[in-house]
Image (cartoon, rainbow, N blue to C red):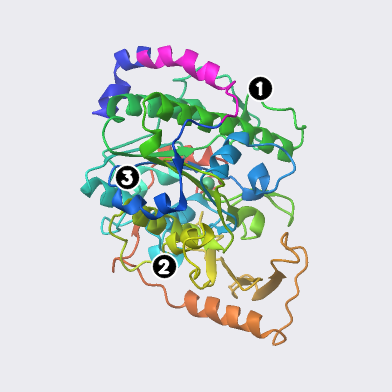
């Protein structure tokens, strides 16, 4: 239904009419949204409500430490700060990979990368995979996904459970913002195109109970407009300007929810799949290693009421915990056999409802640096617990084993490797955990990831994101 709506010429004109609204809204001021006052007890009672919508926004490539609400020195994201100030913010969130597809599969399924098995460019989720959108659809939700990153395209299995799952046509909105990506990004359009599609969905179905997933790409593509503060001309500055632009896109989406009158029955969730490096460890970009600049991401939950003050969860969590948490808040059945766990007990403790939080557990991340190759395997593992972080490069045909150890409190930017074999019981314990994990992959669904054929068109769409893929010698 929505696909037809969006592709019809009539809707195109409706979309054109929206341009005015979009253009005005980018001037939006930070303000306290008109929500009823709430209490921690209202948070505890969310699972009993049964009337909650979910807007689930993935801001691709957004590192947490470039948001002012996470302590950054620049005001890159006043609207996200306002959202967090009266909702729930998780201070330390680990993405399960630094490459979109591996990381997104963990975010959606709650399974660690080795367990869901989406490690290479041609891996796809099997039909047996249990996706949160399926759970919500079965519970009567209208489900829509609007994505601009080809790594979460339907052929990789990410559309399971969505009534509508579309890539918005580029150029639906006036293209005021432009990419300044150093790699000369070729991805057409901007996140305003996704916004136009989201507005259409909300106009058509906002009166039903819905899940709306938006996967935004303008931070990944360093897109911004003239209204972004002129932070500077370095890549890092351009990246920050893109965050500011995206923060305004988010504000507009939020404003649309206000306009259709559903803010007081919507969970508004902000997440990311990985960060971005600016030569902290010799690399720019992402999908090459697992240092904190590419694995620490934000997680903010806007509530259907104002909590004053908002809740900050200090205990570290992972992206695999996001959907277990949201499903519990919605009062829906949990995903079975997965690695993530609900952070609701942590929220309750942080809100002062319970004294006993969950005990911390080791948090894992994984990247196969050979993801763009058909056979070469070059895995990296990271594990964090109790203020320590191990990064482990197992021995391969090409390189010997390497281990790095970092003190996550004293050296959060991971500049000083303090690993000395056998010296630190905590480090040896973490190394043991990650080695055991590397040999115990098990699908939660009892079915391995599928391998799919990618045609030249799809490969080109993915190359346009700046990734090097088979047959990509041209670039
Ligand atoms: Zn990504």
Majority secondary structure of magenta residues: helix
Q: Nearer the viewer, residue 438 or 67?
A: 67
- Note whether ligand 1 is within 8 Å of mark 1: no
Residue 215's place in the image compared with 70, above or below, is above
The label number, if any, that marks residue 159 in the structure image: 3
Q: Mark 1 and mark 3 in contact? Answer it, CB < 8 Å.
A: no
* Quadrant housing residue 261: top left
Q: Which residue is mark 1?
A: 227
Residue 404's place in the image compared with 295, above or below, is below
Residue 56's place in the image compared with 274, above or below, is above
Q: Mark 3 and mark 2 in contact? Answer it, CB < 8 Å.
A: no
- Left or right? Give the position of 42 relative to 135: right
- Left or right? Give the position of 295 relative to 155: right
Q: Which residue is mark 2?
A: 339
Point out the stretch of residues depicted in magenta.
14-31
Residue 289's place in the image compared with 238, above or below, is below
Quadrant (top left, top right, bottom left, bottom right) of the C terminus: top right
Residue at 27%, 52% (x, y): give it: 135
- Note whether ligand 1 is within 8 Å of mark 2: no
| Mark 3 element type | loop
Where's residue 138, x and y in %?
Answer: 21, 49
* Separation of marks 2 and 1 at Cα, in angstroms: 42 Å
- Sequence-wise, the earlier of marks 2 and 1 is 1
| Mark 2 element type | loop
Point out the frontmost of discs 3 and 2: 2
- Sequence-wise, the earlier of marks 3 and 2 is 3
- Left or right? Give the position of 341 relative to 32: left
* Separation of marks 3 and 2 at Cα, in angstroms: 21 Å
């Amino acid at each position: 239904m929505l696909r037809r709506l969006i592709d019809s010429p009539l809707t195109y004109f409706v979309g054109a009419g929206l341009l005015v609204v979009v253009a005005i809204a980018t001037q939006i001021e930070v303000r306290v949204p008109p929500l009823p006052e709430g209490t921690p007890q209202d948070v505890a009672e969310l699972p009993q409500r049964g009337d909650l919508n979910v807007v689930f926004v993935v801001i691709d490539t957004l590192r947490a430490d470039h948001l002012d609400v996470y302590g950054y020195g620049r005001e890159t994201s006043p609207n996200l700060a306002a959202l967090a100030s009266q909702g729930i913010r998780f201070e330390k969130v680990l993405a399960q990979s630094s490459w979109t597809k591996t990381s997104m599969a963990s975010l959606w399924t709650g399974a660690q990368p080795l367990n869901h098995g989406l490690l290479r460019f041609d891996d796809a989720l099997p039909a047996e995979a249990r996706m949160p959108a399926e759970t919500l659809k079965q519970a009567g939700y209208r489900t829509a996904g609007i994505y601009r990153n080809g790594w979460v395209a339907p052929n990789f299995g990410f559309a399971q459970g969505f009534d509508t799952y579309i890539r918005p046509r580029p150029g639906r909105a006036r293209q005021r913002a432009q990419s300044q990506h150093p790699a000369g990004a070729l991805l057409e359009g901007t996140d305003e195109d996704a916004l136009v599609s989201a507005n259409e969905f909300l106009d058509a179905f906002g009166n039903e109970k819905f899940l709306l997933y938006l996967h935004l790409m303008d931070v990944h593509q360093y897109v911004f407009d003239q209204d972004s503060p002129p932070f500077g001309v370095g890549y890092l500055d351009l990246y920050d300007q893109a965050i500011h632009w995206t923060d305004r896109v988010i504000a507009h989406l939020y404003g649309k929810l206000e306009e259709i009158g559903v803010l007081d029955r919507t969970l508004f969730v902000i997440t990311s799949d990985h960060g971005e490096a600016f030569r902290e460890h010799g690399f720019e970009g992402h999908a090459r290693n697992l240092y904190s600049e590419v694995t620490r991401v934000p997680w903010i939950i806007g509530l259907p009421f104002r909590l004053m003050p908002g809740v900050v969860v200090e205990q570290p969590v992972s992206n695999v915990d996001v959907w277990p948490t949201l499903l519990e808040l919605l009062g829906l059945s949990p995903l079975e056999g997965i690695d993530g766990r609900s952070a609701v007990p942590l929220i309750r403790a942080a809100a002062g409802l319970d004294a006993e939080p969950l005990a911390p557990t080791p948090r894992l991340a994984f990247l196969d640096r050979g993801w763009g190759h058909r056979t070469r395997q070059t895995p990296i593992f990271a594990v964090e617990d109790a203020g320590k972080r191990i990064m482990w490069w197992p021995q391969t045909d090409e390189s010997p084993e390497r281990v790095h150890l970092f003190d996550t409190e004293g050296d959060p930017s991971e500049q000083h490797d303090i690993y000395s074999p056998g010296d630190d019981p905590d480090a040896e314990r973490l190394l043991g955990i990650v080695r055991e994990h590397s040999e115990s992959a098990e699908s939660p669904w009892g079915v391995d990831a599928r391998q799919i054929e990618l045609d030249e068109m799809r490969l080109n769409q993915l190359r346009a994101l700046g990734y090097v893929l088979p047959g990509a010698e041209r670039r």
